[in-house]
Image (cartoon, rainbow, N blue to C red):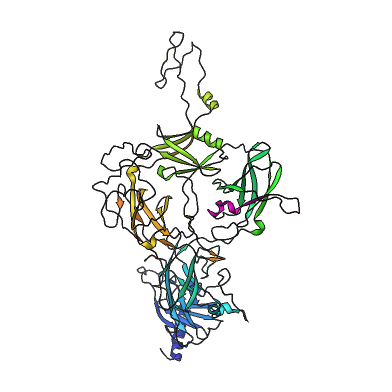
Amino acid sequence: MPPRGTRSLIWACAALLGACAHMEAPPGGPADTKRPYVTAVYPAPDSTNVPRELKAQIAFSEWIATDAERGKVYLNPPLTKRLKTRLSGNVLEVTSKGTLDTNTTYVLGVLGSIKDLNGQPLEGPLQLAFSTGPKLDSGVFQGRETPFQGRPAAGSFAALYPRGAELRARFQHLTRRNDSVVTPTPQPDPLKERPAYIAPADTLGRFSFRSVRPGRYGLVGFQDINGDLAPNVGSEALAIGRSVDIAAAPGEPVSLGLAPYDTIPVRLVEARWAGESVKGGLAYGTIRLKFNRPPHPTQCLRREAYALRRLGPKGAPDSGAPLPVQDVCLNPATGEIELSTMPLDPDSQYVAYCPGLRDLYGNLADTLKARAAFPVGRAVDTAKPAMTFLAPRKVTGEVPRLPVDNLLPSRGITVYYSRLLSDSTLNWLRTNLVLKADTAEARWTLARLNHHEFSLTLALGVPLKGQRLGIGLKPDSAALKASVPAAKPATATVPASPAIPKVPAPSGKDSVRAAPAVPQPIPVAAFTLVDAAKLGSLKFSQDPSAYGTRLVIRGAVSPIEYSRVTPAAAEFIVDSLPEGFYAVDYFRDTNGDGVWHPGSLAPWAVQEPYVQWADSVEVKAGGVSRGDGSRGNPAPSGPGGTGNPPIPGPTGPTKTPPGPAGTPGAPAPAPQVPANAPESSVERKLSWPPAW
C-alpha cells in the first residue's frame, strides 16, 4: 500500500479529474458492452486496526452514473449515524458522522446495480471486510430466497437480527439512541429496529454473509422496493426464517419464500342476520360476519373461533350463556363468514364475538373491534337461489371459481348454495338436479359439506373426450305449463317443419298440429370435460427426508393448481395432468392445514419451509415423464401413487374397449403409450433440506 501522503494525492487527482469533466457517455462509436469493475479500495481488503473514523473509497474502472450516491452502499453492522456518499468521476467516497466501534469487524457493501454512463452494471457486487481490532470475525452463512409463486426478482435481500441480551448488547445501533445509552430487549423487533447485517441476493436468489460476529440470529428476507436497504413491514414482501447459529463453518444453506406481509389487525366490521324462515315462533337463518380484511383462510372455519350471546341492556354486560355455533363457511361472493346456529328468537338483539381470530400473518383480531351486535327480525331472504362452483383450495388459501374448461370430474366439485341447506332443500336438489355429458345422462351423488356447501361426485360410463357437461334444474310445474304450447282450433293449420312431425287430427280431417315441446332443464352451469387423450403423468422420486411434504404443481401458463401430500415411498406418480409445462414446489405443512404459512413477526413465528424448483417440468400426453428417458404406463393408484384415479378409457392408439370402466368399483384400463411418444422431461428428486 502506498504511503499515506501518496495515497491521498492519488485520491485527490481522481477527484480533480471528476470535477473538471462533464459526466456523460461519449457520442457515436460502437455500443459499450464492457461492464465496469472495482479497481482499488480503501481500507484494503481484510485489513485490521483501521481508524475509527470512516473514510472509505472505492475506485471503478470507468466513470459511473450519479445514482451510485443513492442507496447503493451499506455497512454491516450499521452505525448510529447514516452513511454519506460522494461520487467524483470513477471514485466513490463513503463517510459518516458516526464513529466505528472498537474491536469490531465491518463489511462495506456495494450493490451490483451500480452502472456506468452507458447503463452497464458492475461485474459483481463488492463486500469489503475490515476491522478496527486485531482480527476479523469469522462467521459465514448462505442461503437462497425466492418469491412465493414466482421467480427471483431484483432487489431482494437477506437480513440478520441478533438474538439474546448478551449478543445484542454488542451492537451500537441497538445500544445507542441519539446521545443516550439504552439496554436493548433480549429479542429482536424487526418492526422497529434495523438489521445488524444485510446481504443482497443474486439473480438466482442466492445470498451470502461473511465476517459476521458468531452467535444466534433471526433470519429475514425482504424485497427492497423503496431502496432504503431495510425491510418495510406491510409494504414489502417478507420471508421470516428460523433462528440460525452462525459460526466459522457455513452450515446448511436455508431457503426462504418471499410473500406479502400485512400488519393491519383483523376487525369485525358488521354482523347481520339473513333469515330463511320463521316457524314455531323461532327464526331460522344464518349470521353473516363482515371483516375489514380476510382472516386466516382455514382457522376462520373453526367453530371455536366464534361466540354468540343475547345482547344485554344498554350499559349492562351481554346476558345468557354462549349459544353454540354449529357450522361455519365462507361466502365466495361477498367474502363474509357465515355462521349457522340454533334457531333464534325473532325481534331480539344478539352480539357475535371473535376475539381469538387471526389472519394469515398471525395478526390477532383487534380486541376493540372483535364484537358486533345485530337484530334478528322476521323478514326472510327473497333473493333467487344461486349456485357457485368452486375449485379446490390453493396453498395460498384462495378458493377460486371452478374453471369452465378441462374439468376433471374425478377431482370432485364443490358447490356453494346461497340458501340454507336444510334436509328438505337437499332432498329437493337431489330430485331436481340434472347432469348431462353432451346428451347422455350422467350418474352423480350429492353430499352435504356444511350449511351452505355440498359436493357433487360424477360417475361417467364413457371415456372423457372433451364432452360438454351441462348442469341444470328440472322445470317446476309453472315452467312445465309455460313450455307446452296452447291448443289450436281443429281447423287451424301450422306450417309444416322438419322438426315438427305431422299428426292426425281427432276429427279425421287433415290438419297439422305442433307436437308438444319436451320441457328442457333450466340451465345452471356448463363445463367442458377434459380430453383423456391429452392427459399425462409426472413421476417423482424422493429421499425419506421428504416423505410427507406437500407437493404443489402449478400450470406455467394457466391458473390450475394440484396439491397433495407425498407418500412414504421412494417413487410416486401424479397422474391425470393436462399436457403442458408446470412449476413444481414443495413445503413442510407443519400445521397440516394445507395452506402455506408465511410466518409472523409478533410473535416471531417462522414460515413453513418452502422450496421452488428453478426450472419447469413438462407433462406429455399419454405417458409418464421420467428422468431416464424411458416411457411406460402410469402406475395404478396406491400407497406409492396419487390420490387422483386415472381417467377411464384408452388414451393412445390401442383400441381397448371401455367396458364397465368408469362405473363404481370397476377398474379403469391404464392409458396406453404411443410407440413414438416424445422424450420425457427431466426428473427431480425431492429432498429435505433441499440441495441447490
Q: Is residue 440 magenta?
A: no
Q: Is residue 146 left or right of residue 191?
A: left
Which range of residues does the magenta coloring cover? 293-317
Q: Is residue 314 magenta?
A: yes
Q: Residue at x 50, y 73 (%)?
A: 217
The percent position of residue 635, horizontal first and vertical second, equals 31, 50
Dominant secondary-structure state across the stretch colored magenta: loop
For the residue pair 521 and 305, the one nearer the viewer reads as: 305
Q: Residue furthest front?
A: 321
**525, above or below 144, in the image:** above
Q: Is residue 310 left or right of residue 553?
A: right
The percent position of residue 50, horizontal first and vertical second, equals 48, 87
For the residue pair 424 and 133, the one nearer the viewer reads as: 424
Looking at the rendered image, the quarter that the C terminus falls into is: bottom left
For the residue pair 206 and 480, the one nearer the viewer reads as: 480
Looking at the rendered image, the quarter that the N terminus falls into is: bottom left
The percent position of residue 506, horizontal first and vertical second, equals 46, 10
The percent position of residue 377, horizontal first and vertical second, equals 68, 41
